[in-house]
Amino acid sequence: MSHDNHHHKLELKSANCPYYCGQCNQLGFGLSYTCVKSECNIFYHKLCESPQNLIMHPFSTKCVLKFYPNKYGKESSCDVCGKKIKGYHCKCLCNFVTRHVHPSCLSYEPALVAIDGLTLNLKKVATSACLHCGNMKISSKVPGWAYVSSCGDYCYHVSCVMDIINQKWKNGLITGESDPFQTIRPEFLSDVDKRQQLVIGKKKEKSMKKAATILSVIFNVLTGNSLGLVGNAQKYFFG
Protein backbone atom coordinates (compact mmCIF):
# COMPACT_ATOMS: atom_id res chain seq x y z
CA MET A 1 0.00 0.00 0.00
CA SER A 2 1.15 3.55 -0.70
CA HIS A 3 -0.20 6.92 0.41
CA ASP A 4 -0.77 10.16 -1.50
CA ASN A 5 1.44 12.08 0.94
CA HIS A 6 4.09 9.38 1.22
CA HIS A 7 5.44 7.67 -1.87
CA HIS A 8 7.16 4.69 -0.28
CA LYS A 9 5.33 1.43 0.30
CA LEU A 10 3.42 1.07 3.57
CA GLU A 11 2.95 -2.19 5.43
CA LEU A 12 0.65 -3.16 8.29
CA LYS A 13 2.69 -4.33 11.25
CA SER A 14 2.83 -4.08 15.02
CA ALA A 15 4.75 -1.08 16.32
CA ASN A 16 7.13 -1.95 19.14
CA CYS A 17 6.61 1.39 20.88
CA PRO A 18 4.02 4.19 21.07
CA TYR A 19 3.85 6.51 18.05
CA TYR A 20 2.08 9.61 16.80
CA CYS A 21 -0.17 9.01 13.80
CA GLY A 22 0.84 11.11 10.81
CA GLN A 23 -2.82 11.58 9.84
CA CYS A 24 -4.67 12.52 13.03
CA ASN A 25 -1.64 13.46 15.19
CA GLN A 26 -2.84 11.29 18.07
CA LEU A 27 -1.00 8.68 20.09
CA GLY A 28 -1.12 5.13 18.78
CA PHE A 29 -0.14 1.60 19.78
CA GLY A 30 -0.01 -1.83 18.24
CA LEU A 31 -0.96 -2.41 14.61
CA SER A 32 -0.19 0.50 12.31
CA TYR A 33 0.70 1.25 8.73
CA THR A 34 4.39 2.11 8.63
CA CYS A 35 6.89 2.86 5.89
CA VAL A 36 9.05 -0.06 4.78
CA LYS A 37 12.02 2.32 5.00
CA SER A 38 12.71 2.61 8.72
CA GLU A 39 14.47 5.97 8.35
CA CYS A 40 11.16 7.59 7.36
CA ASN A 41 9.68 6.93 10.81
CA ILE A 42 6.12 7.20 9.46
CA PHE A 43 3.18 5.64 11.31
CA TYR A 44 -0.54 5.76 10.54
CA HIS A 45 -3.41 4.36 12.60
CA LYS A 46 -5.12 1.51 10.80
CA LEU A 47 -8.43 3.39 11.06
CA CYS A 48 -6.86 6.53 9.57
CA GLU A 49 -5.20 4.79 6.64
CA SER A 50 -8.13 2.45 5.84
CA PRO A 51 -11.13 4.44 7.08
CA GLN A 52 -14.84 3.84 6.78
CA ASN A 53 -16.56 6.79 5.12
CA LEU A 54 -19.64 6.58 7.36
CA ILE A 55 -19.78 5.19 10.90
CA MET A 56 -22.73 4.92 13.28
CA HIS A 57 -22.13 6.72 16.56
CA PRO A 58 -21.75 4.10 19.35
CA PHE A 59 -24.12 5.95 21.67
CA SER A 60 -26.71 7.33 19.26
CA THR A 61 -28.75 5.51 16.63
CA LYS A 62 -29.63 8.88 15.11
CA CYS A 63 -26.07 10.07 14.63
CA VAL A 64 -23.89 9.13 11.65
CA LEU A 65 -20.22 10.11 11.68
CA LYS A 66 -18.57 11.04 8.39
CA PHE A 67 -14.82 10.65 7.89
CA TYR A 68 -12.92 13.80 6.85
CA PRO A 69 -9.33 13.42 5.57
CA ASN A 70 -8.46 17.04 6.29
CA LYS A 71 -8.23 19.57 9.11
CA TYR A 72 -11.80 20.84 8.79
CA GLY A 73 -13.01 21.32 12.35
CA LYS A 74 -9.48 21.75 13.70
CA GLU A 75 -10.67 24.27 16.31
CA SER A 76 -12.88 21.57 17.81
CA SER A 77 -12.18 18.95 20.47
CA CYS A 78 -12.69 15.21 20.28
CA ASP A 79 -15.91 14.12 21.96
CA VAL A 80 -14.15 11.04 23.37
CA CYS A 81 -10.78 12.20 24.68
CA GLY A 82 -11.11 15.98 24.73
CA LYS A 83 -7.93 16.50 22.69
CA LYS A 84 -7.89 19.05 19.86
CA ILE A 85 -8.71 17.97 16.31
CA LYS A 86 -5.46 18.38 14.35
CA GLY A 87 -6.00 16.25 11.27
CA TYR A 88 -8.08 13.28 10.13
CA HIS A 89 -11.32 13.03 12.09
CA CYS A 90 -14.99 12.07 12.00
CA LYS A 91 -17.82 14.60 12.27
CA CYS A 92 -21.47 13.89 12.86
CA LEU A 93 -23.99 14.74 10.16
CA CYS A 94 -26.68 15.69 12.69
CA ASN A 95 -28.27 19.12 12.46
CA PHE A 96 -29.04 19.44 16.17
CA VAL A 97 -25.61 18.68 17.68
CA THR A 98 -21.99 18.82 16.54
CA ARG A 99 -19.60 16.03 17.41
CA HIS A 100 -15.98 15.53 16.34
CA VAL A 101 -14.13 12.28 17.05
CA HIS A 102 -10.64 11.01 16.29
CA PRO A 103 -10.93 7.80 14.21
CA SER A 104 -8.74 5.91 16.70
CA CYS A 105 -11.08 6.88 19.54
CA LEU A 106 -13.85 4.88 17.86
CA SER A 107 -11.91 1.63 18.25
CA TYR A 108 -12.55 1.03 21.96
CA GLU A 109 -14.53 -2.06 22.92
CA PRO A 110 -18.03 -1.31 24.29
CA ALA A 111 -17.71 -3.90 27.07
CA LEU A 112 -14.82 -5.78 28.65
CA VAL A 113 -14.97 -8.71 31.05
CA ALA A 114 -12.39 -8.05 33.76
CA ILE A 115 -13.16 -11.01 36.01
CA ASP A 116 -16.18 -13.24 36.54
CA GLY A 117 -19.10 -11.09 37.58
CA LEU A 118 -17.35 -7.80 36.83
CA THR A 119 -17.71 -6.05 33.48
CA LEU A 120 -16.25 -2.74 32.33
CA ASN A 121 -18.71 -0.78 30.22
CA LEU A 122 -17.74 2.10 27.95
CA LYS A 123 -19.91 5.12 28.78
CA LYS A 124 -20.25 8.45 26.98
CA VAL A 125 -20.08 10.14 30.40
CA ALA A 126 -18.52 8.99 33.65
CA THR A 127 -21.06 7.93 36.27
CA SER A 128 -18.67 8.72 39.13
CA ALA A 129 -15.40 10.55 39.63
CA CYS A 130 -12.49 9.16 37.61
CA LEU A 131 -10.02 7.49 39.96
CA HIS A 132 -7.09 9.23 38.30
CA CYS A 133 -8.17 12.86 37.77
CA GLY A 134 -10.85 12.88 40.47
CA ASN A 135 -13.41 14.52 38.17
CA MET A 136 -16.49 13.34 36.33
CA LYS A 137 -15.67 15.50 33.28
CA ILE A 138 -12.32 15.89 31.55
CA SER A 139 -13.13 19.55 30.82
CA SER A 140 -15.98 22.02 31.17
CA LYS A 141 -17.00 21.44 27.54
CA VAL A 142 -16.22 17.74 27.08
CA PRO A 143 -17.38 15.04 29.55
CA GLY A 144 -15.17 12.40 27.94
CA TRP A 145 -15.86 8.69 27.56
CA ALA A 146 -14.98 6.39 30.43
CA TYR A 147 -14.87 2.75 31.39
CA VAL A 148 -17.12 2.10 34.37
CA SER A 149 -17.23 -1.17 36.28
CA SER A 150 -20.54 -2.99 36.61
CA CYS A 151 -20.32 -2.67 40.39
CA GLY A 152 -19.94 1.09 40.04
CA ASP A 153 -16.83 1.27 42.22
CA TYR A 154 -14.25 1.85 39.48
CA CYS A 155 -14.21 4.50 36.79
CA TYR A 156 -11.44 5.70 34.45
CA HIS A 157 -11.57 8.23 31.64
CA VAL A 158 -9.95 6.66 28.59
CA SER A 159 -8.10 9.96 28.11
CA CYS A 160 -6.60 9.78 31.61
CA VAL A 161 -5.01 6.40 30.97
CA MET A 162 -3.73 7.64 27.61
CA ASP A 163 -2.28 10.75 29.28
CA ILE A 164 -0.37 8.61 31.77
CA ILE A 165 1.12 6.51 28.98
CA ASN A 166 1.87 9.59 26.86
CA GLN A 167 3.73 11.36 29.67
CA LYS A 168 5.78 8.28 30.53
CA TRP A 169 6.70 7.90 26.87
CA LYS A 170 7.76 11.56 26.59
CA ASN A 171 9.96 11.09 29.65
CA GLY A 172 11.66 8.16 27.94
CA LEU A 173 10.23 5.57 30.32
CA ILE A 174 8.42 3.56 27.64
CA THR A 175 10.50 2.08 24.84
CA GLY A 176 10.35 -0.99 22.65
CA GLU A 177 12.29 -2.89 25.31
CA SER A 178 10.20 -1.90 28.33
CA ASP A 179 7.01 -3.36 29.72
CA PRO A 180 4.49 -0.50 29.45
CA PHE A 181 2.27 -1.69 32.27
CA GLN A 182 5.16 -1.98 34.72
CA THR A 183 6.29 1.49 33.70
CA ILE A 184 2.96 3.13 34.53
CA ARG A 185 2.43 0.97 37.63
CA PRO A 186 3.31 3.80 40.13
CA GLU A 187 0.49 5.96 38.77
CA PHE A 188 -1.98 3.11 39.06
CA LEU A 189 -0.81 2.24 42.58
CA SER A 190 -1.49 5.83 43.59
CA ASP A 191 -4.99 5.61 42.12
CA VAL A 192 -5.62 2.33 43.91
CA ASP A 193 -4.69 4.06 47.17
CA LYS A 194 -7.28 6.73 46.38
CA ARG A 195 -9.84 3.99 45.93
CA GLN A 196 -8.90 2.45 49.28
CA GLN A 197 -9.82 5.68 51.02
CA LEU A 198 -13.30 5.40 49.54
CA VAL A 199 -13.85 1.72 50.24
CA ILE A 200 -15.12 1.07 53.73
CA GLY A 201 -15.64 -2.38 55.22
CA LYS A 202 -13.92 -4.25 52.38
CA LYS A 203 -10.71 -6.20 52.59
CA LYS A 204 -7.84 -4.15 51.18
CA GLU A 205 -6.11 -6.96 49.32
CA LYS A 206 -9.31 -8.09 47.60
CA SER A 207 -10.09 -4.54 46.49
CA MET A 208 -6.53 -3.97 45.24
CA LYS A 209 -6.54 -7.17 43.21
CA LYS A 210 -9.80 -6.16 41.59
CA ALA A 211 -8.45 -2.67 40.85
CA ALA A 212 -5.26 -4.10 39.35
CA THR A 213 -7.29 -6.37 37.10
CA ILE A 214 -9.57 -3.56 35.97
CA LEU A 215 -6.69 -1.22 35.19
CA SER A 216 -4.79 -3.84 33.26
CA VAL A 217 -7.84 -4.70 31.14
CA ILE A 218 -8.39 -1.02 30.30
CA PHE A 219 -4.71 -0.63 29.49
CA ASN A 220 -4.88 -3.70 27.28
CA VAL A 221 -7.76 -2.41 25.15
CA LEU A 222 -6.30 1.10 24.82
CA THR A 223 -2.93 -0.11 23.61
CA GLY A 224 -3.99 -3.21 21.69
CA ASN A 225 -1.40 -5.13 23.69
CA SER A 226 -1.70 -8.88 23.20
CA LEU A 227 0.15 -9.80 26.40
CA GLY A 228 -1.64 -11.44 29.30
CA LEU A 229 -1.73 -8.20 31.23
CA VAL A 230 -4.24 -9.36 33.80
CA GLY A 231 -1.77 -11.91 35.09
CA ASN A 232 1.12 -9.47 34.75
CA ALA A 233 -0.69 -6.78 36.69
CA GLN A 234 -1.44 -9.05 39.61
CA LYS A 235 2.18 -10.24 39.61
CA TYR A 236 3.46 -6.66 39.80
CA PHE A 237 1.07 -5.66 42.53
CA PHE A 238 1.28 -8.73 44.71
CA GLY A 239 4.49 -10.56 43.74
Image (cartoon, helix red, strand yellow):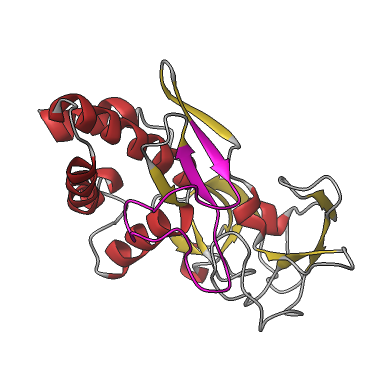
Percent coordinates x, y for residue 99 in the rendering: 73, 66
Q: Where is residue 162 in the image (x, y as percent from the top left)?
A: 42, 57
Q: Position of residue 78 (x, y in %)?
A: 62, 67
Q: How many marks?
A: 0
Q: Which residue is drawn at 73% across and 79% down?
A: 73
Q: Check the image and report above or below for 169 versus 209.
A: below
Q: Is residue 130 above or below residue 231?
A: below
Quadrant placement of the C terminus: top left
The answer to whether 157 appears left or right of 210 in the picture is right
Which image quarter is the N terminus in? bottom right
Residue sitting at the far bottom:
75
Bounds of the magenta segment: 120-148
> In front: 130, or 168?
130
> Toward the viewer: 226 or 197?
197
Q: Which residue is drawn at 63% across and 75% down?
A: 85
- Check residue 146 for magenta coloring: yes
Q: Which of 22 and 162 is in front in this view?
A: 162
Residue 121 falls within the magenta-colored stretch: yes
Q: In which quarter of the image is residue 235?
A: top left
Instruction: Provide the major secondary structure of the magenta segment.
Output: loop
154 left or right, relative to 145: left
Residue 170 placement, left or right of 92:
left
Extreme-top residue of the structure:
116
Q: Residue at x 28, y 57 (%)?
A: 174
Farthest left residue?
A: 239
Location of residue 26 by image quarter: bottom right
211 with respect to 235 (left or right):
right
**Residue 164's spot in the image, x, y percent?**
33, 59
